[in-house]
Image (spheres, rainbow, N blue to C red):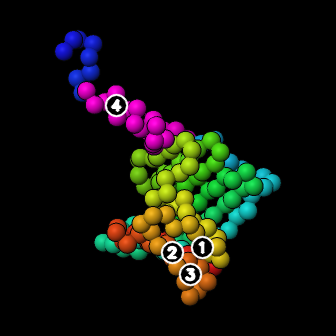
Amino acid sequence: MNAGASAVPGWPLLGFALLLAGCAFPGRRLPPWDLTSPGWTITEMSAAWRPASDSPELAGELLVARNTDGSRLVQFAKQGVPVVVARSGPSGWEIRSPFRTASAAGRGAPPKSIVWFRATAPKELPEAPEGWKVVASEQGGWILERPVTGERLEVAP
């Protein structure tokens, strides 16, 4: 091996694959949005989230903001403290939590496997990506669940 060669031969290939996939890169952030500007519709509702089958359910408030340009912001909060914030728009997507140092962001459409990017208003059933199921709840909301992991998000009006 010559002195200029990479000590880990798979790194260039991995980097290229991540670039093609539009994968998440920590630190990339979307510009701030003003939800009071024209074009935004904001819906607030009660929600319960269970990250995995062996995790406790967390009850809180879900805010879904949609803009006429297709941008969306979803925030799950507990007693006013954001737990998860997910945003997507024409320039990309990001998801972050003040409780974790890691965040994820990317270009193009957000990952379908992240429940926060599927959240909608209570009376609209969200799209259920492969491996997920969605049902209308008796309270007039919906439940989106991934049976293989036990992750579950339920919203009520």
Whether residue 77 is visible to the viewer of this picture, yes or no, is no
**Residue 8, horizontal then vertical, whole percent:** 24, 27
Quick check: 96 left or right of 87? left
Seen from this angle, which residue lies furthest front? 130
- In the picture of the structure, the residue carrying the numbered disc 4 is 13
Cβ atoms at labels 1 and 4 below 8 Å apart: no
The residue positioned 67% from the left and 52% from the top of the image is 71
Q: State the SS at label 4.
A: helix
- The mark that comes first in sequence, 2 or 4, is 4
Cβ atoms at labels 3 and 4 below 8 Å apart: no
Distance from Cα at disc 3 to Cα at disc 4: 44 Å
Quick check: 11 left or right of 157? left
**Residue 51, horizontal then vertical, whole percent:** 39, 66
- In the picture of the structure, the residue carrying the numbered disc 1 is 125
Q: What mark, if any, has residue 134 been given in the picture? A: 2
Whether residue 51 is visible to the viewer of this picture, yes or no, is yes
Q: State the SS at label 1.
A: loop
Mark 4, Cα crowd under 10 Å, few <14 / some 14-19 / many 20+, is: few
Q: Name the residue type under label 1.
A: Leu
Q: Name the residue type under label 2.
A: Val
Q: Is residue 105 magenta?
A: no
Q: Is residue 28 magenta?
A: yes
Q: State the SS at label 3.
A: strand
Placement of 136 over or under 88, stated as above or below: below
Distance from Cα at disc 2 to Cα at disc 4: 37 Å
- In the picture of the structure, the residue carrying the numbered disc 3 is 136
Placement of 12 over or under 88, stated as above or below: above
